[in-house]
Image (spheres, rainbow, N blue to C red):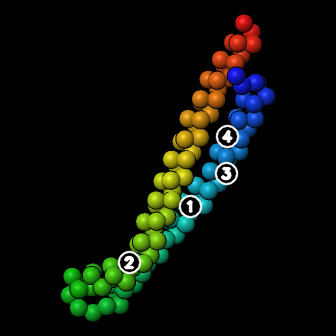
Amino acid sequence: METPRQIISELAAIRSQSEKGIELLAAAERKMIELELEEQRIELSTFIGTSGTVADKTAISKLAALEKRQEAAIARAEVSRIKTKISHLKDSQMAVMSAAKMVELEWKG
């Protein structure tokens, strides 16, 4: 059986991880947006600076922005992973709070 001190410690650890997760999420979202904007800038500037048919210009500009598109996709996956981790921390917090209620009932009983 867990003690109230252990439960408080677990909740503090979860809170600390959640706060870090929120900071990481903000940084990851910022990085993702910057990469997406850079991808668009490369694609548009290449499109404008290339001669040929619209289809040719589109294909060339998409190829030119491919590396940034891949980086942006990786950044989106990182944002998703951080959101999943934050959600898991919320679930863990609820489980610990349920355990705390059961410990409270045991100590009172």
Write down the residue under mark 3. 20
The type of residue carrying mark 4 is Ile
Mark positioned earlier in the residue sequence (2 or 1): 1
Mark positioned earlier in the residue sequence (2 or 3): 3
Element type where label 3 sits in the image: helix
Front-lying residue, 72 or 34 = 72
Determine whether, in the image, residue 11 is placed left or right of residue 66. right
Q: Quadrant of residue 102?
A: top right
The type of residue carrying mark 2 is Leu
Q: Determine if residue 44 is in view.
A: no
Rendered location of residue 47, percent (x, y): 33, 84
| For discs 4 and 3, the disc positioned in front in the rendered view | 4
Mark positioned earlier in the residue sequence (4 or 2): 4
Front-lying residue, 106 or 41 = 106
The type of residue carrying mark 1 is Ala
Q: CA distance from mark 4 to mark 3?
A: 10 Å
Mark positioned earlier in the residue sequence (1 or 3): 3
47 is higher (above) or lower (below) than 82: below
Q: Quadrant of residue 29?
A: bottom right
Q: Determine if residue 45 is in view.
A: yes
Which quadrant does the N terminus fall into? Answer: top right
Element type where label 2 sits in the image: helix
Q: Which mark is residue 28?
A: 1
Q: Are marks 4 and 3 in contact (CB under 8 Å)?
A: no
Q: CA distance from mark 4 to mark 1?
A: 20 Å
Q: Residue at x 58, y 55 (%)?
A: 25
The type of residue carrying mark 3 is Lys
Rendered location of residue 99, percent (x, y): 64, 23
Front-lying residue, 100 or 19 = 100
Q: CA distance from mark 2 to mark 3?
A: 32 Å
Q: Which mark is residue 66?
A: 2
Q: Which mark is residue 14?
A: 4
